Image (spheres, helix red, strand yellow):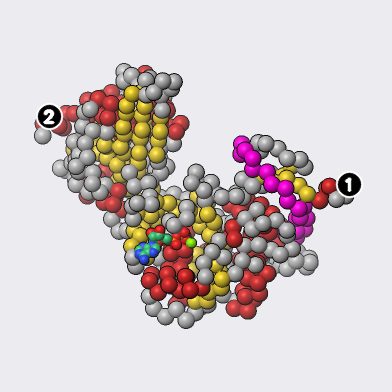
Amino acid sequence: MAKKAQTVFVCQECGYESPKWMGQCICGAWNSFVEEKVTPAPASDVRRRTASGVLEGKAPKPVRIGEVHSSQASRIDTGIAELNRVLGGGLVQGSIALITGEPGIGKSTIIIQAASSIAQKEGTVLYVSGEESEEQIKMRADRVCQGDLSNLYLLAETNMENVLEAVNQLHPAFLIIDSIQTMYCSDLESAPGSVSQVRACGNLLMNVAKGQGIPVFVVAHVTKSGELAGPKIVEHMVDTVLQFTGERNQDLRILRSLKNRFGTTSEIGAFEMREEGLVEVDNLSGSFLEGFEDSAEGAVATAVYEGTRPLLLEIQALTGPSGIGFARRTGIGVEANRLNMIIAVLERKAGISLLSRDVYVNVVGGLKPEGTSTDLAVALAVWSAEKGISIPHTTLIIGEIGLTGDLRPVMHAEKLCKEASRMGFDRIILPRRNLGRVKDVPRELELVGVTTVKEAMEASQKGKNNG
Ligand SMILES: Nc1ncnc2c1ncn2[C@@H]1O[C@H](COP(=O)(O)OP(=O)(O)O)[C@@H](O)[C@H]1O
Ligand SMILES: [Mg+2]
Ligand SMILES: [Zn+2]
């Protein structure tokens, strides 16, 4: 009996534990349960996580707030402005960050670039890789890093005990683990990448970060669907979750934070993948609108406010007869529910019948804009594709759509308009309620206020006739 109680079935997606095997987990995942040995949770986990300096076995010791060293004051410059921005102003001492992304997207590249910069300014950096040999990492470093790398230490290792030994020897200013799925603790029997291994390794790395004040970067792979391959529990443990995305056949890479205990999650960083590594992109709007000028039906330019800056982008739509059964609605970069809502509004409020039509919408450049300021552009792109009517390429469209088909004002409209003007747009169609708030824009920029999707469609064609 005692023997039986020693194993538990753990969902490899969410970490849910069940005494018996289940076909589907409460999180919705199918066939995600793996039998693992029961591992008693470390009793002092909470204490170790919250009170830095308190070691296992010692009594917790509250400190006066005045004696607490403020980590805000001690941020480390990673040498990469876009990375600093996404982190909320640099790397916080003793923080632990997860960097996720599909294989080949550039996680190891951005990390070695940050590591080399930190090694030159802050001292010893330890780069632990369970994925590549020291030679492979050195080859990449030779290609993408400049300057004196004598403080950068490499360790090809998958055993956590050995990693901790190296950390104790070197006392690095920055620790990198590439990747969490390859690491294991030898006192657990389950395979690297399993929930219990990832949890145990994650806890040990938390101790290093919080206990010794060392900032730690942990790489984690994601599957194609964007989920963390294997356990999601690491996301809850760490302070920051960074996501690196991009399209494989394009050079543009976007870094964003999905979680950040030390800053906003709305900042994005943009890079271009080149032979010499990841290069920061200055003119972000320009890079998303590349090739927009010669695009035609179904293409609409719009703008979002991402973090602290305006960003222009292109929405493309395609429609076609649907097969027998049901019409397909596919949004890439547009949330499915949002797209369905917009299509419903087009049908009910603008008289566009899409019942037996497939609808595809794509945000060019692999972006997933968070705001709702792109709603109207999505609607007009679908309409433009369906009707074969093009919208002039110097017209930009912003606006949030309500369920009644009326348009709601967008935030930061003035900044979006200014950026559009800077990028050469001369006409902006926007919710009428935004008009009063957009004042300080160049005089040659024509602002057209509209109240419904239908009005926006008409307005988009007026500029065409005049010009
Ligand atoms: N010699 C090279 N020149 C240009 N780009 C390269 C070169 N070698 C690798 N890359 C780029 O680096 C990418 C791999 O980056 P890497 O940081 O190893 O990804 P990850 O760690 O996320 O799997 C490749 O997909 C390719 O785009
Ligand atoms: Mg890698
Ligand atoms: Zn689950």
Image position, residue 46 (x, y; %): 71, 57
For label 1, the crowd category at 10 Å Cα-Cα, with few meaning under 14, some 14 to 19 and many 20 or more, is few
Of labels 1 and 2, earlier in sequence is 1
Q: Is residue 438 visible?
A: no
Q: How far across and how far down the image is residue 81, in percent?
A: 39, 63
Q: Name which quarter of the figure residue 56 lies in.
A: bottom right
Q: Estimate how packed mark 2 is, as few (under 14), some (14 to 19) or many (20 or more) residues with alpha carbons within 10 Å.
A: few
Is residue 333 part of the magenta span, yes or no? Answer: no
Q: Which quadrant would residue 398 be assigned to in this image? A: top left
Ligand 1 position by quadrant: bottom left
At horizontal 89% and vertical 46% (from top left) the residue drawn is 1
Mark seen at residue 24: none
Q: Is residue 168 visible?
A: yes
Q: Secondary structure at mark 1?
A: loop
- Going by the numbered disc 1, the residue's amino acid type is Met
* Residue 37 lies in the magenta stretch: yes
Q: Nearer the viewer, residue 391 or 74?
A: 391
Q: Position of residue 192 (x, y in %)?
A: 64, 58
Q: What residue appears at the point 64 percent right and 43 percent down from the top-left corner?
A: 32
Residue marked by disc 1: 1
The image quadrant that residue 65 belongs to is bottom right
Residue positioned 74% across, 63% down in the render:
187
Residue extending farthest right: 1
Q: Examine the rendered structure and indicate whether residue 261 appears above or below residue 373.
A: below
Rendered position, 399 above or below 185: above
- Image point (30%, 48%), residue name: 288
**Disc 1 and disc 2: Cα gap in Å?**
83 Å
Give the label, 1 or 2, closer to the camera.
1
Under mark 2, the amino acid is Asn
Q: Which residue is mark 2?
A: 465
- Image quarter hosting the C terminus: top left
Q: Which residues are magenta?
A: 28-45
